[in-house]
Amino acid sequence: MNQPEITGNINIEQFREDLIAWFRAEQRDLPWRADQDPYKIWVSEIMLQQTRVDTVIPYYHRFLELFPTIDALAEADEDKVLKAWEGLGYYSRARNLQSAVREVRDKYNGVVPDSPKEISKLKGVGPYTAGAILSIAYGIPEPAVDGNVMRVLSRILLIREDIAKPASRKIFEEAVRRLISHESPSDFNQALMELGALICTPTSPSCLLCPVREHCIAFHEGVQAQLPVKSKKKKPKQVLLAAAIVEDQDGRILIRRRPAEGLLANFWEFPSIEIQRPYANDREALERFYREELGVKVAIDESLGQIQHIFSHLDWNVTVYVAQLAKPLEDKENLRLVSLPELAGFALPVPHQKMLSLYSVKI
DNA sequence: GAAACGTGGGG
DNA sequence: TCCCCAAGTTT
């Protein structure tokens, strides 16, 4: 008798019961588990996308203090929202969340929709987040398939699909539809993720502590360490930049708002240019860029040094210069001259915070 | 379907 | 140092 190669042979009733019982006993005490307010669940799910729990917790508390309700977030200035998200990364999450919250206010009378079709139309709410909100806030048995769930189920059901491929998600959604508890969809979905976070970890899973190891095909076959199958991503592309921190005579600093789309959209920055190789005509190139692209006359001084910042897809190496404003600044919407204390109120991405520390050490 | 989109932590 | 990762979505 051969074992089936994929899926199937587990006692679903017993699996659910063991998994949920473990979750009810062992779940972490997390701030978004205090109640089932759909708005708060929503905020937490957006913040948790590709982001660690420990990182999210302080942001979650501050965000809900600033924007406690859908109306509060809907009415806020986007700048305040971005500032609250500063340092969390993937900033389109914040802009999409606010846009979606405004849609809920205007179109759904302030009530987060409880149907898969409607909730999935909201900006920033993809298949995972839709399922998470529906199941956790509303108790609706929809799959919420994230990286944890794919890893856990790849082991339990011995699924060898490459979980890095977008198409694989559907395989796991179908698996969850077969397995999910209709009595406690919230606990079931959260339990799968919690198991992935605490026990069924990417490397060296704690199978001896696992509440469902008797249901786990990979454990029975001793292949849990070889799962999930996941192709690796490519390295970030190297980019050389030269940036200038421009001062006026009162020690104020020039910042610019980045474009509304793309990398670090709508954040503020010290203007910079891409260069071909280090130290080649940086000063002339920067002065020309400021003059021709920004309409600002500056004189570049010495270099303060370099900073490095690695994004998911880019590896920035930035040579940072100090410069003096040579003519008074003309009024422009995307350019500001701000004091150091004022600068703290603007949303500044981490690489530019690094540049600012170089500057602060210098002065 | 691949690439864009951030950041900080851990092995 | 380097690589992988962490409760994904959009284009």
Image (spheres, coloured by chain):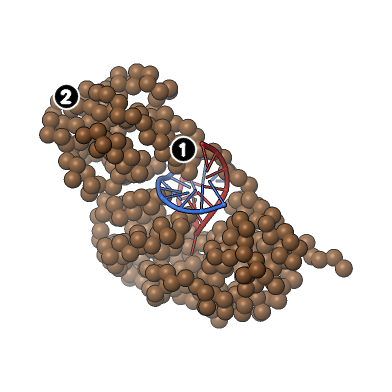
Chain colours: A brown, B blue, C red
**Quarter of the image that includes the C terminus of chain A:** top left
> Is residue A187 left or right of A285 when viewed as pictured?
right
Residue drawn at x 85%, y 65% is A2
Residue A36 drawn at (x, y percent): 41, 75
What kind of residue is marked 1?
A: Leu
Q: Answer with mark 2 or mark 1, whichever residue precedes in sequence.
A: 1
* Quadrant in the rendering for residue A212: bottom right
Residues indicated by labels 2 and 1 sit on the same polypeptide chain: yes
Q: Is residue A262 above or below residue A88?
A: above
Is residue A129 in view? yes
Badge 2 marks a residue whose secondary structure is loop
Q: Residue A314 bears which disc, if any?
A: 1
Looking at the image, which residue sits at the far bottom? Answer: A183
Is residue A168 at least partly visible in the picture? Answer: no
Identify the residue under disc 2. Answer: A326
* Chain for disc number 2: A
Secondary structure under tag 1 reads strand
Relative to A204, does residue A25 appear above or below in the rendering? below
Q: Residue at x 30, y 55 (%)?
A: A84
- Pointer 2 local density, CA inside 10 Å: few below 14, some 14–19, many at least 20: some
Are dots 2 and 1 in contact, CB under 8 Å? no
Would you place residue A175 above or below residue A247 in this image?
below
How far is the residue under mark 2 from the one under mark 1?
33 Å
Q: Is residue A319 left or right of residue A233?
A: left
What quarter of the picture does the N terminus of chain A occupy? bottom right
Q: Quadrant of residue A327?
A: top left
